[in-house]
Image: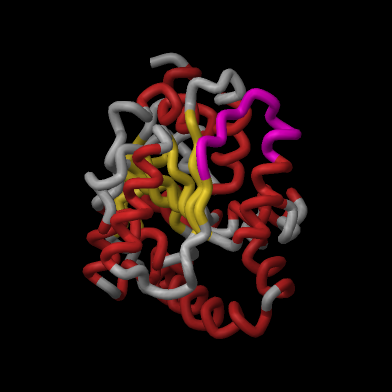
Amino acid sequence: MGKEETKNRAVHIRVMGVKFTFCDIGTAVKAVLKKCSSLKGRYICFTNVHTTVEAHEDAEYRKVLNGAAFTFPDGMPVAFAARIKALRTGKKYSPKRVAGPDFMRLAFEGSRDGKVKHFFYGSTDETLAALTEKLEKEYPGINICGKYSPPFRELTEDEDRDAIRMINDSGADLVWVGLGAPKQEKWMADHAGKIDALMLGVGAGFDFHAGTVKRAPLWMQKTGLEWCYRLLQDPKRLFSRYLKTNTRFIMLMLLGRY
């Protein structure tokens, strides 16, 4: 097997019960854009330390992540844990991170011919407006067929049916879902087979690409410290989450239960 083939080959490794797909991010994006029609009705998750630990503790949520077409490692620590497992089994590949915001950027760039239609579901009207304006400016030719900011509460059955109809009538190929974890993953699982498009849960990706929230410097992303940057941006909301799940992740690693 040649070096390029080895580099681009996707492998599957379970970390704390979650089945992850590891591959080069460029390969992942190309495969999704090429096969999005055959993946319609399914969903993709981008899972970090927080959601991995949540899935480890919650069997139902773990079932949601493992029911995805692909679950990619959004966090560097998750990729690191998989790398250790690979080394212990004598595998000659090095699992890497596939971050949701980076996946979005490459997908936008790769669909500037307008053949793939994008729909954005989640966040606020203001963020969606800023996101649309920025994407159309930075990726001329991109085909944004719709966007919707649902109310910050559970939708009624009628509202949900209307939302499904709106998305399907738009002819979307990719539905980017920005509801925050674990809500967005559960929403995608509940709507699998109902939405005639491939759904991708990308959390704060909407804010990053809209420019409403600044992303961590590249060196922090590469060294696995992006969580720290986000904590400094929103300590009130994230402190207890990171204290609990990051500590739990480290303990499970030390105990070899990953």
Most foreground residue, 46 or 136: 136
Compared with 70, 74 (above or below) is: below
Compared with 196, 182 (above or below) is: below
| Percent x, y of residue 42 | 29, 42
Q: Quadrant of residue 2?
A: top left
Is residue 167 covered in magenta?
Answer: no
Most foreground residue, 26 or 170: 170
Instruction: Give the residues drawn in magenta, as a range.
Output: 135-146
Give the side of residue 201 with respect to residue 214, left or right: left
| Percent x, y of residue 35 | 36, 25
| Percent x, y of residue 51 | 42, 65
Q: Quadrant of residue 107?
A: top right
Is residue 139 covered in magenta?
Answer: yes
Most foreground residue, 50 or 237: 237
Please name the residue shown 50% across and 58% down the image.
122
Compared with 168, 30 (above or below) is: above
Please name the residue shown 44% across and 52% down the image.
201
| Percent x, y of residue 127 | 66, 57
Marks counted in the figure total 0
Please name the residue shown 51% across and 47% down the image.
120
